[in-house]
Amino acid sequence: MSGLFIPIALALAGLVMALAAYRGIRRGGARFYTLEREAMLRRAGFSLLFSVLLFLASVSLLALERQQNLAADAAEAGNASEGGTASTPTQVIQTFPPTETPSPTPDLTLPTPTVTPVVCRASIENTGGSGLTLRTAPAGDEIRVLAEGTIVTLLDEEPVTVNNFTWRKVRVLGGDEGWVAEQFLVVGAPCN
């Protein structure tokens, strides 16, 4: 009973402070001028804060005392069951056999990723406006004349040198394939 006196006294002091704060708030009504009202409400707010702190102190003292009582009771129970010697209980950790984790199955509805080939493009330039002849083979028969500025796709075949010209195999937008002189091609960025 002696351990309850301080928390109860703190709780009663907190209640008195809360009532004083309420009274201060009620007095801070329209009877006073604005500056006096603000000062009165500020004092009431501080007293309310102080009352909350008193309540918290009383609750924490009660919790601390309860925890100490429980620890003392547990120690007495341990001494009584062991015949005077206190023992520390040991924890037993149970291990279960590990479970197999299922391997992920591939989702067959998703498309298979494929490598996108790099398409090399070039434009026909520096022909003086006369265009470039598309041929069946390096220095071979003429298929057609490609105008300056025409975009062609470079094919994977290795360049061939014939008659002091390096020839590249290309495909034109319409689908025609043939050979052109490389010196009149300006190759795009990914193929430089």
Image (cartoon, rainbow, N blue to C red):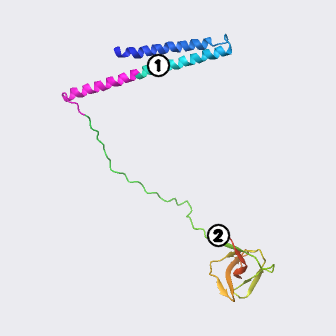
Q: Which residue is mark 2?
A: 190
Q: Secondary structure at mark 2?
A: helix
Callout 1 crowding tier (Cα within 10 Å): few <14, some 14–19, many ≥20:
many
Q: Secondary structure at mark 1?
A: helix
Q: Is residue 39 left or right of residue 144?
A: left
Please state which amino acid type lies under the numbered disc 1: Phe
Queried whether the magenta region covers residue 66, the answer comes back as yes
Q: Residue furthest left?
A: 83
How far from the left and from the top, in percent, is residue 47?
A: 54, 16
Foreground of the two, 178 or 8: 8
Q: Is residue 57 left or right of residue 186?
A: left
Report the quarter where the C terminus lies: bottom right
Q: Main secondary structure of the magenta part?
A: helix
Task: Examine the rendering and report whether any part of residue 177 can be seen.
Answer: no
How far from the left and from the top, in percent, is residue 173?
A: 73, 74
Task: Examine the rendering and report whether any part of residue 40 can be seen.
Answer: yes
Q: Image point 65% across, 77% down: which residue?
A: 155
Q: Which residue is mark 1?
A: 55
